[in-house]
């Protein structure tokens, strides 16, 4: 009858040490989590970009593609035409304005010749009038002759003034036509998509004959210059990251070093994690600091590559 209580008592005595050991382990684990271990390196996912970032190419105006002068992997200089749209209407308007300009210049030349002729007549009329003024005192000419010469001189002066006003008007018309030509030239220039910097065409998503509009990208462009790795550092280590710290990149899940570099820019604030965040519904309440690493010259990494960025922390 007393056997069962005795067995239970013995079992309780053996369970006490194991419960004590489990409680000790739980406390140790809790303590480990409450005191973060200081890391010597931070590893984060990074994206390779030019320092000026990849640029999407957009036309300045809509139209049908007439010609593509540069395709994928072509190196181009700033201002070089990459793609051209059909601009026959604008070209016709330009030709018409240039034709009017030539005609207007001929009209101005004619006006100048007429003004010069009128000026000669006016000078001659003035000479006759002055001479008659001198002769009237000696009675060599009549008052009527003096009055006629005065009228001829004053009329010639009015003719010269009218001709000068007409020439100014023609000159003004010439300026208007030159402004029209400039306007049509700009319309034609808008039909040409030019390289914004020295650099390389990364992609060309169009073919000749496609219609494009101003909100439609025709391809991507990488400005010339060094590459950088853009990564994000968790808020736990954000204050330990400084400009000038060394870093290197490696393939994801591997230890091979692809390139080395130094941090040249750190974000002044913390934000939600955005880099490679494919799930828009991700509600994780974590903050990160954006960090940009300037890679050494000669780094051979594909733009847009997803790599691991290892930042060496200072003690």
Image: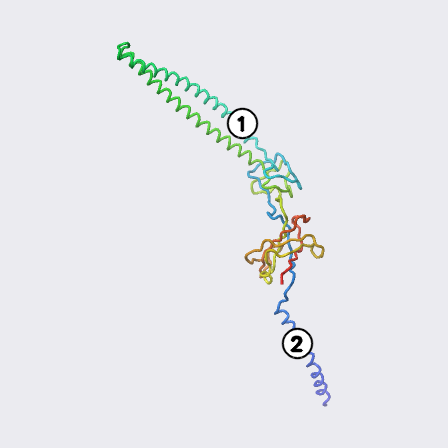
Judged from this view, the residue extending furthest toward the bottom is 1
**In this orientation, does residue 284 appear?**
no
Query: Where is residue 32 drawn, in percent x and y?
Result: 64, 70
- Report whether 29 appears left or right of 167: right
Q: Position of residue 213 (x, y in %)?
A: 57, 40
Q: Given the current orientation, which residue lies at the most extreme top position?
A: 140
Bin the neighbour count of mark 1 within 10 Å (Cα to Cα): few under 14, some 14-19, many 20 and up.
some
How busy is the neighbourhood of tag 2: few (under 14 within 10 Å), some, or many (20 plus)?
Answer: few
Which residue sits at x=64%, y=38%?
70
Name the residue tied to disc 2.
24
Task: Pick whichever, 6 or 140, lies toward us.
Answer: 140
For residue 95, the mark is 1
Q: CA distance from mark 2 to mark 1?
A: 92 Å
Vertical placement of residue 53 versus 192, above or below = below
Whole-percent x, y for residue 8 in the image: 70, 85
The quarter in which the C terminus is drawn is: bottom right
Its colouring scheme is: rainbow
Which residue is more in the foreground, 10 or 122? 122
Q: Is residue 148 above or below residue 203?
A: above
Give the structural element (helix, strand or loop) at label 1.
helix
Q: Secondary structure at mark 2?
A: helix
Label 2 or label 1, whichever comes before in sequence order: 2
Task: Decide if residue 135 is on the left or right side of residue 85.
Answer: left
Residue 156 location, quadrant: top left
Q: Quick one: 174 or 56, which is closer to the camera?
A: 174
Res 225 visible: yes
Q: Quadrant of residue 58?
A: top right
């Amino acid at each position: 009858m007393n056997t069962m209580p005795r067995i239970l008592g013995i079992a309780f005595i053996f369970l006490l040490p194991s419960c004590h050991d489990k409680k000790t382990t739980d406390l140790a684990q809790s303590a480990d989590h409450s005191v973060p271990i200081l890391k010597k390196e931070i590893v984060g996912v990074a994206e390779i970009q030019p320092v000026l970032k990849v640029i999407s190419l957009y036309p300045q105006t809509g139209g049908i593609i007439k010609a593509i002068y540069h395709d994928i992997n072509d190196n181009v200089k700033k201002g070089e035409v990459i793609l051209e749209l059909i601009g026959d209407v604008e070209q016709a308007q330009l030709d018409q304005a240039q034709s009017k300009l030539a005609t207007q210049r001929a009209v101005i030349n004619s006006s100048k010749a007429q003004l010069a002729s009128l000026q000669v007549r006016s000078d001659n009329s003035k000479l006759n009038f002055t001479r008659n003024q001198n002769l009237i005192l000696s009675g060599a000419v009549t008052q009527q002759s003096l009055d006629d010469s005065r009228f001829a001189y004053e009329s010639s002066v009015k003719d010269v003034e009218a001709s000068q006003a007409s020439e100014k008007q023609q000159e003004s018309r010439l300026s208007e036509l030159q402004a029209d030509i400039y306007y049509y030239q700009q319309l034609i220039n808008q039909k040409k998509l030019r390289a914004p910097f020295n650099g390389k065409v990364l992609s060309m998503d169009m073919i000749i004959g496609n219609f494009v509009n101003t909100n439609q990208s025709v391809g991507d462009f990488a400005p010339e210059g060094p590459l950088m790795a853009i990564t994000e550092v968790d808020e736990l280590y954000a204050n330990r990251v400084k400009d000038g710290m060394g870093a290197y990149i490696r393939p994801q899940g591997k230890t091979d070093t692809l390139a080395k570099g130094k941090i040249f820019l750190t974000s002044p604030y913390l934000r939600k994690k955005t880099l490679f965040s494919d799930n828009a519904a991700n509600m994780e309440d974590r903050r990160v600091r954006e960090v940009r690493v300037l890679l050494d010259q000669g780094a051979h990494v594909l733009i847009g590559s997803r790599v691991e960025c290892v930042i060496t922390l200072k003690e």
